[in-house]
Amino acid sequence: MSERRFFTEKSNIIGGHVFLMGDEHRHLSIVLRLRQGDNVVVCDGTGKEYNAVVSKIEKSRTLLDIVSEEYTNSEPRLNVTLYQGLVKGEKMDFIIQKATELGVTKIVPFTSKYTVAENSLSKNDRFYKIALSAAKQSRRAIIPEISEVQNFDDLLKFVKNNKNVILAYENENANTLKQALTNIKSKVVTLIVGSEGGFSTEEVEELMSVGAVSVKLGKRILRAETAAISILACTMFDLNEWE
Ligand code: SAM
């Protein structure tokens, strides 16, 4: 049962016991109203999960006794980072939720010339909660990292210093995603998808000049959220993460 799945820092796992504090303690004791003797699964965010029994519920923390531990095999071998042009409102929430289910490792929201969504710091806490909830529901061992919103120069610097960067670009006429993935020899891939307004020609040229490979996702213009989910799903499938 994914709703009885909790995440805690490794440091909260001490000598056969687990401590849950903060939101996770409140979720267990108030939202789910679990009680002493109830079974839960606790993930330490490194790939390990612990079958545990609620032993004591205090005001500000829950103490659990570990019954057994195992490595979760729900994590992909592929380390995929999605650089996602900031999109408005719930569309970003949707992308974070679906990308988490699909196995993304990190999401980096960024702004570019045609970004229309407002960039406010308050987003990050909400984004984290969406990733946490999706990680629980999809029984992941880790919660994908959602970084602070970056700007186009940060994106350019990242592309310059990293390999295996694929840019989804609707005006690309030669490269296909299949070809781009065939050339990937490592297990670390970065996918870039634009915001509702897409990229300027100059931005695309700059990204390609520092090593990004642009690919077409079919002959139709996809919404940003469709493109993000599609390119991630196709990458996972093509690189054998769906076996
Ligand atoms: N330039 C688009 C237009 O003419 O309406 C607006 C951008 S589109 C809504 C959002 C993003 O999805 C694009 O920046 C691109 O990254 C991706 N995208 C959409 N359709 C695509 C396609 N057919 N091939 C590759 N990428 C696509």
Image (cartoon, rainbow, N blue to C red):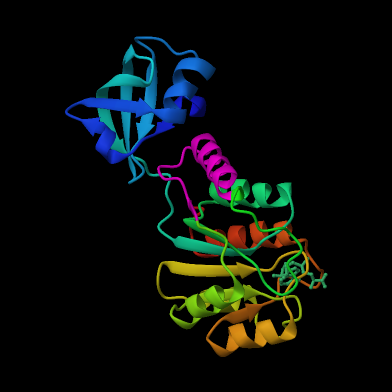
Q: Is residue 33 above or below residue 215?
A: above
Image quarter where ligand 1 lies: bottom right
Q: Taking the image as drawn, is residue 32 in sight?
A: no
Residue drawn at x 45%, y 16% is 29
Q: Dividing the picture into quarters, in which one does residue 186 lie?
A: bottom left
Residue sitting farthest toward the right: 220
The span picked out in magenta is: 124-146
The answer to whether 150 appears left or right of 39 in the picture is: right
- Residue shown at 32% from the left, 17% from the top: 53
Residue lying at the far bottom of the rendered structure: 209
Figure disc tally:
0
Q: Residue extending furthest top?
A: 36
- Which of 121 and 85 lies nearest the eye of the viewer? 121
Across and down, in percent, residue 125 comes to: 55, 44
Q: Which of the 4 image quadrants contains residue 196? A: bottom right
Q: How far across and down, in percent of the image, does residue 152 sit?
A: 60, 74
Vertical placement of 170 versus 49: above or below? below
Looking at the picture, tell me which residue is in the foreground, 99 or 153: 153
Percent of width and height locating residue 194: 69, 68
- x 53%, y 74%: residue: 154
Is 178 in the magenta? no
The quarter of the picture where residue 34 lies is top left
Q: Is residue 224 left or right of residue 188?
A: right
